[in-house]
Image: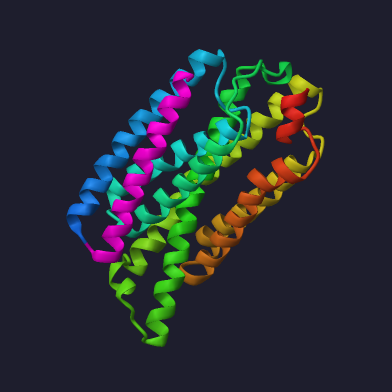
């Protein structure tokens, strides 16, 4: 067995355990499970770092070029961002969401082809790790924002209807969730912007044009405008709470389609099959 696959499976197992612990925290409200879940997840993140390094050593290039590698990298970025958020906000419910999403990404990554292939000449550039890392950091930050926005709307609905379930008492305050949503936007939008700019510069070097209206580029621009509108609304119009949460959810769904839907369903230069077959 290739070493990176072995480390990948160990990471997947640890993420599964941490997901169970965070779900137990939400269901049973066990602080011990929350603390244990945090440390297990931290250990999983360290093993995941080793997985990526080993994959890099075995392949000779940044492990970011196919569905297996990109989903694994997204899970790594999501877990890393959540661990930073957890140190500041201590949101067990968000941990259950982040761990579940990371675990789902790892499972899909695990059933995708894992072979180490020769690098496509079009991807043989130092722009590859720069562009993809910035893009995935933005994706991971906005995934956390999406989770916070969903929790905001759930809690607000319970407050308005005055129908409080046991889950209500597990949720952070509306103020904390709205603040986290704004913080994610403040860090995620620059990362997304730099990812798009670096991609355009790389495209000019590889294809001779900064912008070709490839489906991936088009949807990335649509997503960028949605987050730009959300940032503008927060800074200049005073959007907060429900309106900001709804737009954060819509923008992330668009972002999710830009990442997976476009790459898997639409023809273009960013299609996984096209990248592997060039």
Query: In this rendering, is residue 149 above or below 73?
Result: below
Q: Quadrant of residue 81?
A: top left
Q: Which residues are magenta?
A: 1-29
Q: Residue at x 24, y 65 (%)?
A: 28
Q: Main secondary structure of the magenta part?
A: helix
Q: Quadrant of residue 151?
A: bottom left
Residue 161 drawn in magenta: no
Q: Residue at x 68, y 45 (%)?
A: 220
Q: Residue at x 65, y 36 (%)?
A: 196
- The front one of 166 and 115 is 115
Query: Where residue 32 appears, x then y in whole percent?
Result: 17, 53
How many tags in the picture?
Answer: 0
Instruction: Left or right? Give the position of 105 relative to 155.
Output: right
- The front one of 205 and 154 is 154
Q: Is residue 238 visible?
A: no
Q: Residue at x 41, y 84 (%)?
A: 160
Quarter placement of the C terminus: top right
Residue 10 drawn in magenta: yes
Query: Where residue 204 appears, x then y in whole percent?
Result: 76, 24
Q: Is residue 247 visible?
A: yes
- The front one of 94 and 211 is 94
Query: Where residue 116 appears, x then y in whole percent?
Result: 59, 20
Instruction: Left or right? Give the position of 106 relative to 119.
Output: left
Query: In this rendering, is residue 266 above or below 212?
Result: below
Query: Where residue 265 appears, x then y in whole percent?
Result: 75, 46
């Amino acid at each position: 067995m290739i070493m990176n696959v072995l480390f990948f499976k160990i990471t997947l197992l640890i993420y599964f355990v941490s997901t169970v612990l965070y779900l137990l925290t939400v269901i049973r409200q066990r602080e011990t499970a929350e603390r244990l879940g945090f440390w297990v997840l931290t250990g999983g993140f360290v093993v995941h770092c080793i997985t990526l390094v080993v994959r890099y050593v075995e392949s000779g290039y940044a492990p970011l070029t196919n569905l297996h590698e990109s989903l694994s990298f997204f899970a790594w970025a999501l877990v890393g961002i959540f661990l930073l958020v957890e140190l500041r906000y201590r949101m067990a419910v968000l941990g259950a969401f982040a761990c579940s999403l990371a675990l789902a990404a790892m499972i899909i990554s695990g059933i995708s082809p894992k072979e180490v292939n020769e690098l496509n000449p079009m991807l043989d550039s130092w722009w590859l790790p720069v562009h993809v890392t910035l893009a995935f950091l933005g994706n991971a930050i906005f995934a956390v924002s999406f989770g916070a926005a969903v929790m905001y709307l759930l809690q607000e609905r319970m407050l308005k209807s005055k129908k409080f379930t046991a889950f209500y008492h597990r949720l952070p305050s509306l103020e904390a969730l709205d603040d986290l949503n704004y913080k994610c936007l403040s860090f995620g939008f620059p990362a997304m912007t730099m990812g798009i700019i670096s991609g355009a510069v790389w495209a000019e070097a590889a294809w001779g044009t900064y912008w070709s209206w490839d489906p991936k580029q088009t949807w990335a621009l649509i997503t960028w405008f949605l987050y730009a509108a959300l940032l503008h609304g927060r800074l200049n119009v005073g959007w907060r709470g429900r309106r900001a949460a709804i737009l954060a959810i819509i923008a992330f769904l668009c972002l999710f389609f830009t990442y997976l839907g476009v790459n898997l369903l639409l023809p273009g230069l960013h299609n996984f099959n096209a990248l592997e077959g060039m």
